[in-house]
Amino acid sequence: MTASDQHTRRPTLADVAKAAGVSVSTASIAFSGSGPVSDATRERVLAAAASLGYDGPDPRARSLRQGRSGVIGVVLEGSLLYAFRDPVTSITLDGVATALGPQGAGLLLLTDSGEGAATIDTAAVDAVILLGCSTRVDHSIEVFGRRDIPVVSVEGPSRPELVEVTLDNRAASVVAAQHLQSLGHTRVGIATLATADGHDAGPVTDDTPIAVSVTRERLLGTREVYPDAPAWSSVHNTPEDGRRAALELLSVDAAERPTAIVAQADLLAIGVIQAIEELGLVVGVDVSVIGFDGIRIDGFAHDLTTMVQPASEKGHAAGAAVTALLAGDRPDTPIAFTCELHVGSTTGPAPTA
Amino acid sequence: MTASDQHTRRPTLADVAKAAGVSVSTASIAFSGSGPVSDATRERVLAAAASLGYDGPDPRARSLRQGRSGVIGVVLEGSLLYAFRDPVTSITLDGVATALGPQGAGLLLLTDSGEGAATIDTAAVDAVILLGCSTRVDHSIEVFGRRDIPVVSVEGPSRPELVEVTLDNRAASVVAAQHLQSLGHTRVGIATLATADGHDAGPVTDDTPIAVSVTRERLLGTREVYPDAPAWSSVHNTPEDGRRAALELLSVDAAERPTAIVAQADLLAIGVIQAIEELGLVVGVDVSVIGFDGIRIDGFAHDLTTMVQPASEKGHAAGAAVTALLAGDRPDTPIAFTCELHVGSTTGPAPTA
DNA sequence: GCGCGAAATCGAATCGATTCGACTACGCTA
DNA sequence: TAGCGTAGTCGAATCGATTCGATTTCGCGC
């Protein structure tokens, strides 16, 4: 090593140790605090570090040696744009962050879509949280299993080796449907979420394969009450897609037309309401609308009837589960959450005509 | 190593190499594709890997050796909850992700708030993108500089060593104010974003120190046209905070009352409108409202007058800048974006009374 | 005054890959 | 047939820390 190298190269712990006149192991201890060091030594090490411009151990080296990176992977369905457009995702993620907060683990965003698939198995994560993913991630789950990386699945795929955080999607959908039933509705239409990542929007029959568990469970719940209800799937959880679905469902003879629409998500419901109004119909009178999620939509004109889910708690539970798993405890699984019916002004008695 | 260890321990590249009867270096090349290998050898290595359940190189070891982790840090202001509640953040982040997409770099979410501060300097990131951060991250920027970690600041702090992606916040705010001026408004109130992370809401005078550059620039722009306009700062960019700000600004004698309110963000504007309506006034008639951002608010009843900013492009530029920096190119800085005035129905002529 | 345990420090092994330089063998040209 | 370039392979160094076991030093009780 020449003198000029010393200017170029970033200082390492070895340089600091040499400058402080101690061994590398002692310097390491002085930084990490694991093990006994005299105050004098520690100060000497820290002083040497400061004068060399050393900012602490290289995280890469540290994580190799310790086998932990301090990073939790969060796998989202589809693109970030659509993932975060749904407030439920943000709120859940915030719950995760708060549960993880104290340790200050970083959250690494990953998606289960095409390109990212290379990354998802490649990332240096200590644990993984799947947020509403489809069966597409099955392969990755196996890889994580072989690597002893704990996986928490929030309303995602179900497998024995992973910890699940669940919502009573099916039961809640039954409650929602019964609410409509109690109002006298007999003809309802269903606006579903995506059946599988990358699939086009279109009619959903009993034979349609559904890879996304949330979509499947909510549909099954509704069909328990309304077995023959026509359903139309969307690609994204957005008002635009909900609007399109509603237009499809409502474009039939007036005699056949649904008097109520079950939307599998509030964002879809917003679009459904928009479509109804475009058709010159009155929401809650001509056509009732019930959503799912219970998000607060700022400045939204209607008080949406919906199944309110505890998104923040869900995220918090997922974060806590990760913490437990990393500590060696295996939490009881599944960790189940339930929804509550909120009756707003978008549902009303079935029109008598 | 005993036989039982082989069952416990995860296989390493060395194990694979031994099983395939090749050297570790050859096995490495067979996996990474860097360097010549005969097809026969590669197949033998891959077969050995498959039979041992080896899923590719350990990312920790790889990143130590290569000095790169494939992870880009994204530093957000405040908590994730509030960060993602603003659609601008999500959209920008998605822009970043698309620009980074092909390489499949992961995005590591970091916040500049208290606890995370330990993490932010500790994370193994190849580059960092600051999204609208305050001066609080100044120390971290220095650390990144010493570590040769490129930093891109999107509407964040400005320093010579970092690449900046900017918005014409000040000029756009002038345009917004001039729009009100052209409508005859003389008394306007300003609902600002947070002046500094952790600060309480309250009046903003010329002496108030403002650590968040976005807040400062937009305020300066408005004050160029309306030097004496009273301003009230919020803590979070939410309708609730906007509503409170509006109630503060409007709770004066009718003669003194602003006929228009400039909100520094659309989410604030929504709350402002809500407050106006609560007071029994008519938006766009009694009190005009202009926002900033140009987000589409699903199902929102009003067509908000606002300065539309290219959030996605901003994110994309930031991602592209990171890519360039990592490739060794230093992009021209700052990379500047401009806003456009969208005139909706929430602004109208100043009341003549 | 002797011995013992704890505190402080050190040297060396280790984490699991990538990469560099060296070596072999082979095919091609003159 | 001698010479040369290249594809293929290997061994060893390296990335920068943490951690284990050993060694030294010191204080204290008996």
Image (cartoon, coloured by chain):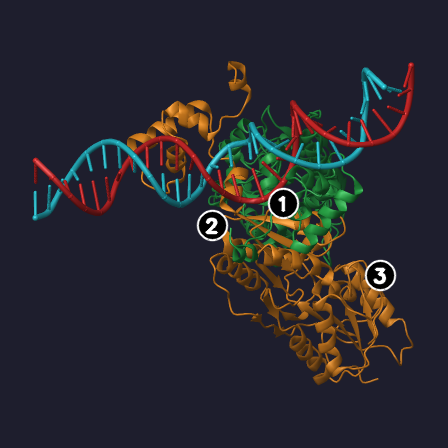
Chain colours: A orange, B green, C red, D cyan
Tell me the chain of label 3.
A
Tell me the number on the disc at residue A103: 2
Q: Secondary structure at mark 3?
A: loop
In the image, A126 versus A129, the foreground residue is: A126
Dot in front, 3 or 2: 2
Q: Position of residue A303 (x, y in %)?
A: 67, 68
In the rendered image, residue A103, in percent from the top left (x then y), is placed at 47, 50
> What residue type is disc 2 on?
Gln
Residue found at x 57% / y 70%: A334
The chain holding disc 1 is: B
Q: What number is the disc on residue A55? A: none
Q: Relative to B30, is D18 on the left or the right?
A: left
Q: Residue at x 58, y 66 (%)?
A: A310
Mark sitting earlier along the chain (3/2): 2
Q: Position of residue A151 (x, y in %)?
A: 59, 59
CB within 8 Å, label 3 to label 2: no
Q: Is residue C7 above or below residue A168?
A: above
| Residue underneath mark 1 | B13
Query: Within the image, what quadrant is residue A162 found in?
Result: bottom right
Same subunit, labels 3 and 1: the answer reads no
Answer yes or no: are tags 2 and 1 on the same subunit.
no
Q: Chain of mark 2?
A: A
- The three-letter amino acid code for the residue at tag 1 is Leu
